[in-house]
Image: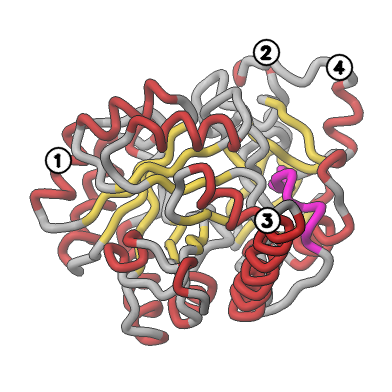
Amino acid sequence: MTAGLRTPLCDLLGCDVPILQAGMGGPARHELAGAVAQAGGFGMLGMVRESADLIEQEIRALRALTDRPFAVNLIPAATDPALLKAEMDVALSLKVAAFTFFWDPIPREIARAKAAGALVLHQVGSLEAARLAEAAGADVLIAQGVGAGGHIHGTIGALVLTELIAREAKVPVVASGGFATGASLVAALALGAQAIQCGTAFLATQESYAHEYHKHRVVAASAEDTVFTDAYVLNWPKGAPVRVLRNSIIQALGHNLTGHDPADLSHEVIASEDGRPLLRYSTDSPLRTTEGDLEAMALYAGESASFVDAVPSASETIGRIMAEAEAALVRVKQFGKSGA
């Protein structure tokens, strides 16, 4: 690997390459996080609002795959306090080395994780949220642009947001939301970030726990096929937008993509997962064990879907991004020589 592509954040997190795998709730289980970590990236378990038992099971299964560091992704601001306590209790009892938090920074949870010796990575969608997270003690800031798939907590693009935060932050910054190639990794480093975080690129991998239907919809999609909407909001607070692939639900909304109140949305059951009913307009995405009307579910994908054209292994995805990054650096140097 080109020496210029290894950053201080790699040393902090214990990874070999500056590529983080987003903690996608559902798809990011031990197979994916373990494969990313073993390939030299930084893996995350997406354990948002999962039971303590499942979190323990996933942590132990991941550690059976690799001894590399990883993070557990939780969302304190959108989780019932009792459940959050149980999630944190089990993760800390198993001495997890890092947590990734998202949504509004909750200082007491950041402080609790750090008091136990864990690193805290906090994903933010604005400069103000970055300031609050850093002031609360976050060790790393993940700047999530509006082009990201899944839940989005900001309104501006990743290029501008990343540079804004990197200019001011005293801690390492990671760029997220539209990053799935080596060229985008080089661009992120040029903006002041020390790594990229990829969600869509890792959702469509062999180890992802996403349903094959979801993976192949991502492969077939382009950036123009993704939509910013708050229609898929059941199970989340009002006004929590997501980026998903266009489907029959989105088509039926016409231009009314935002402004939806969970109280006014249909609670019709359209699918099930291990016997659990899944509702139309819920935030659940189709996983390996999901059955029912998959087409109508939240098919999360970011604008970087344009660069996903297959379902490789996580290791192959990391290898591709790093090879592309080295090629991008060569191009930049050639441009410099030609202009000399």
Extent of the magenta region: 298-308
Q: Which residue is mark 1?
A: 111
Q: Amino acid at mark 1?
A: Ala
Nearer the observer, 220 or 322: 322
Instruction: Report the mark closest to the observer, 4 or 3.
Output: 3
Q: Residue at x 62, y 78 (%)?
A: 319
Q: Residue at x 34, y 48 (%)?
A: 172
Count residues near mark 1 (Cα–Cα under 10 Å), then give few for <14, some for 14-19, many for 20+: some
3 or 1: tag closer to the N-terminus: 1
Q: Which residue is mark 4?
A: 255
Residue 237 at least partly seen: yes
| Location of residue 59 (image quadrant) | bottom left
**Horizontal and vertical percent position of residue 3:** 45, 73
Q: Is residue 253 above or below residue 90?
A: above
Which quarter of the image is occupied by the C terminus? bottom right
Instruction: Report the mark closest to the observer, 3 or 2.
Output: 3
For the residues labelled 2 and 1, say whether their Cβ atoms are less than 8 Å apart. Answer: no
Numbered tag placed on residue 195 in the rendering: none
Q: Residue at x 14, y 40 (%)?
A: 111
Q: Which residue is mark 2?
A: 259
Q: Amino acid at mark 2?
A: Gly
Residue 307 is covered by the magenta coloring: yes
Instruction: Report the mark closest to the observer, 2 or 1.
Output: 1
Query: Spatial distance from mark 2 to mark 1, Cα to Cα?
Result: 34 Å
Q: Is residue 230 above or below residue 217?
A: above
Residue 207 at least partly seen: no
Nearer the observer, 334 or 129: 334
3 or 2: tag closer to the N-terminus: 2
Q: Which residue is mark 3?
A: 336
